[in-house]
Image: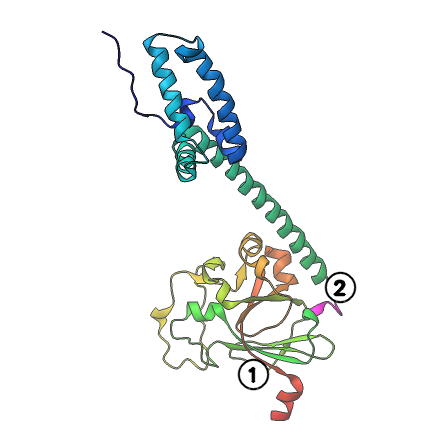
Amino acid sequence: MKKSVSHSLPRNPFEIFGLTPTLVGELSEKDLVNVLKGMYRNLQKAFHPDTGGDRGVDGRNRAVELNLAFEALDLDRNLVAFRQHRKNYLLTHPSNARNNTLILRDRLKNQAAREEKLADVFFSYLLHAADETQLGALAQLGARNVLLGLQDVAIKNNVRHASWLLGSNYKNIEINSDGALRTRAVGRRHFCASNNTVLLGCVPKDTVNITPLLERCAPSRIFKSPAITDYDPDALPQVTVRNLINQDNFKKYLLSSLKPILMESAYLFSLNRHEFSSSGLISLEGVIVKMETLEKQSSAL
């Protein structure tokens, strides 16, 4: 019994023509149609009985299948169907999807390598600018006659009863007309010179969750601010955070957002030469909540 000729189209038309997904994906619609026309003519010569092709049942079936596939890919008559067949062919072919995945992975890897190299260069520049031979115009971000009010981040996280109210974890940094820096630590009455500290810049507070990036240590002592009157020894956590961050986290999560200016509602980072030389860690001064000129502050007093 002779096999009947099937008029269905069980396979994707592009697969029937034997085109690879890579070629289908790379060619423009116009060029793809030109390729299909040339393949259709040559294949019909090989299979269609009227052109001297295979006159068996398989040959006739193949000729009908080519006709149906060519009609399904008629760009002028049915643009929507053409694009849908093309999309389906690319999405359902595993090798093509794998190739695209590998290409995308390589691009992301190269991009990450470029960003890492750029971060290393920028970080090296910051270290050079913070060198003691560079003090002067580059020191303290060029700021002069400024009084900063900051909230200490580590105290806020380590002492449950500390709050963002002034006093419990509030500190000051003063930059005079010569660019010299003095600090009044939390709970202290007087300023102390900070000759080994150079400010690096600010990162807006709403751009990063800083606490997970900070260094951890076992609690060694209890901090008690004069503003904390209801101190509870049980409030101290088992692991405390420090106002320090390692270079890898600093370069990966903060360096791209670092601004070489002083600004409110931002984390202020610095390089303490003694700390950095011994541990390689960057210092977090705190969150700037207040900025004013020294002249204004002096007149108020």
**Label 2's element?**
helix
- Residue at 73% x, 67% y is 138
Q: Quadrant of the N terminus?
A: top left
Task: Identify which amino acid the numbered label 1 is placed on.
Answer: Arg
- Residue at 51% x, 30% y is 32
The residue lying toward the viewer, choosing from 287 and 222, is 287
User: Measured along the vertical axis of the image, is residue 142 above or below residue 57?
Assistant: below
**Number of the label disc, if any, that sits on residue 134:** 2
Q: Nearer the viewer, mark 1 or mark 2?
A: 2
Number of numbered discs visible in the structure rendering: 2
Residue 52 drawn at (x, y percent): 44, 8
Q: From where the camera sits, is residue 301 visible? A: no
Q: Which residues are magenta?
A: 135-139
Residue 81 drawn at (x, y percent): 39, 37
**Number of the label disc, if any, that sits on residue 189:** 1
Q: Is residue 192 left or right of residue 59?
A: right
Q: Is residue 68 left or right of residue 215?
A: left
